[in-house]
Image (cartoon, rainbow, N blue to C red):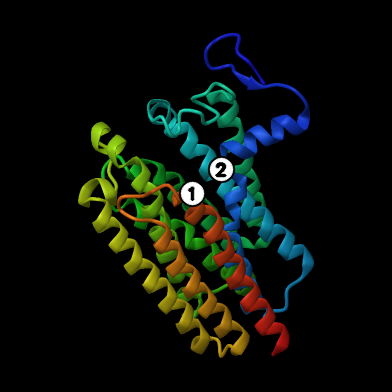
């Protein structure tokens, strides 16, 4: 699986597909499903007044993949020494030695370049914004070192996805689309708090900051519930802001039920189902939103 001649030169070995999987696991490529449906929802909402060309959609998807992959790769590099000390994360690709810091750095450079290129193809405004967006994405990796608000910051930077898609297609920022970004921010921050509950002891011992480490797990779960209630509220506001129909409203009701189920899975004295809530339920929520927006637009 790996070759390690001298420190810092470890690289994935084996077939090409195996190497691709190694990089994909490093950045948890499967988690792209959390934010991508929100960006695609913005695309559907925008194309009602701004018809979408296929080439623009391709560049937009490329920008999404590039930005997220670069941000996650950077996070893995910055957190490698911390991950090595945490039993839950010690098996990640860099601390486990399956991928070197050098290889990961080249990965980040490559996908940062992809993001900037795709942004440039989407227009001058997108190109100008690509640098600041990358800085915001990269800066998240440092926040848990000094503030328990890191979850909200993560939600804020990821919430740029639908806003960026809207700007790429319309060339401007519209008030209603900010509701979708606000929903994504609260949604991401809420389940990131749930996920952080797993590391409460490690964070407290190493001086890292998180809402669970600062306030306790019961308080953190309560804050996550408030954030998800806010996200549900923003989803409902989209119904009126974009004059949506019954299909979208039904999707929002289903999302609300899924959020309730998610929080019933995670209890202060039982975190065994955090990963189920984090990945499976949240994946269904994201896809449900996109399908609700898409089908509602098609029917209308």
Quadrant (top left, top right, bottom left, bottom right) of the C terminus = bottom right
Residue 96 rendering spot, x and y as whole percentages: 52, 23
- Percent from the top left, x then y, of residue 255? 51, 73
Quarter holding the N terminus is top right
- Residue 61 lies, in percent from the top left, at 68, 58
Foreground of the two, 85 or 148: 85
Outermost residue, top direction? 5
Residue drawn at (49%, 25%), measured in percent from left and top?
Answer: 95
Label 2 residue SS:
helix
The residue under the point 27% across, 52% down is 217
Q: Quadrant of residue 143?
A: top left
Q: Is residue 39 above or below residue 211?
A: below
Q: Looking at the picture, tell me which residue is in the foreground, 75 or 228.
A: 228
Asked whether the viewer can see residue 49, the reply is: no
Residue displayed at 59% across by 18% down: 10
Q: Which mark is residue 70?
A: 2
Residue drawn at x 31%, y 50% is: 269
């Amino acid at each position: 699986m790996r070759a390690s001649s001298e420190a810092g030169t470890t690289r994935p070995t084996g077939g090409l597909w195996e190497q691709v999987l190694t990089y994909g696991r490093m950045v948890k490529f499967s988690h792209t499903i959390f934010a991508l449906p929100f960006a695609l929802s913005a695309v559907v909402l925008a194309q009602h007044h701004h018809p979408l060309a296929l080439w623009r959609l391709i560049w937009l998807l490329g920008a999404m993949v590039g930005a997220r992959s670069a941000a996650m790769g950077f996070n893995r590099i910055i957190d490698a020494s911390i991950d090595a000390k945490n039993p839950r994360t010690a098996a990640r690709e860099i601390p486990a030695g399956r991928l070197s810091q050098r290889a990961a750095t080249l990965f980040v450079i490559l996908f940062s370049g992809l993001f900037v290129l795709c942004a440039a193809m989407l227009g001058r405004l997108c190109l100008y914004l690509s640098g600041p967006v990358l800085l915001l994405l990269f800066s998240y990796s440092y926040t848990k070192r000094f503030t328990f608000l890191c979850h909200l910051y993560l939600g804020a930077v990821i919430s740029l996805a639908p806003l960026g898609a809207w700007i790429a297609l319309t060339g401007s920022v519209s008030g209603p689309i900010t509701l979708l970004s606000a929903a994504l921010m609260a949604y991401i921050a809420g389940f990131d708090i749930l996920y952080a509950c797993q590391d409460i002891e490690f964070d407290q011992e190493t001086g890292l900051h998180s809402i669970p480490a600062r306030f306790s797990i019961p308080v953190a779960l309560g804050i996550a519930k408030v954030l998800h209630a806010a996200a549900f509220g923003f989803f409902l506001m989209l119904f009126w802001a974009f004059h949506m129909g019954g299909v979208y409203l039904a999707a929002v009701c289903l999302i609300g039920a899924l959020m309730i189920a998610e929080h019933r899975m995670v209890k202060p004295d039982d975190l065994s189902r955090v990963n189920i809530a984090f990945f499976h339920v949240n994946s269904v929520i994201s896809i449900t939103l996109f399908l609700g927006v898409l089908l509602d637009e098609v029917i209308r």
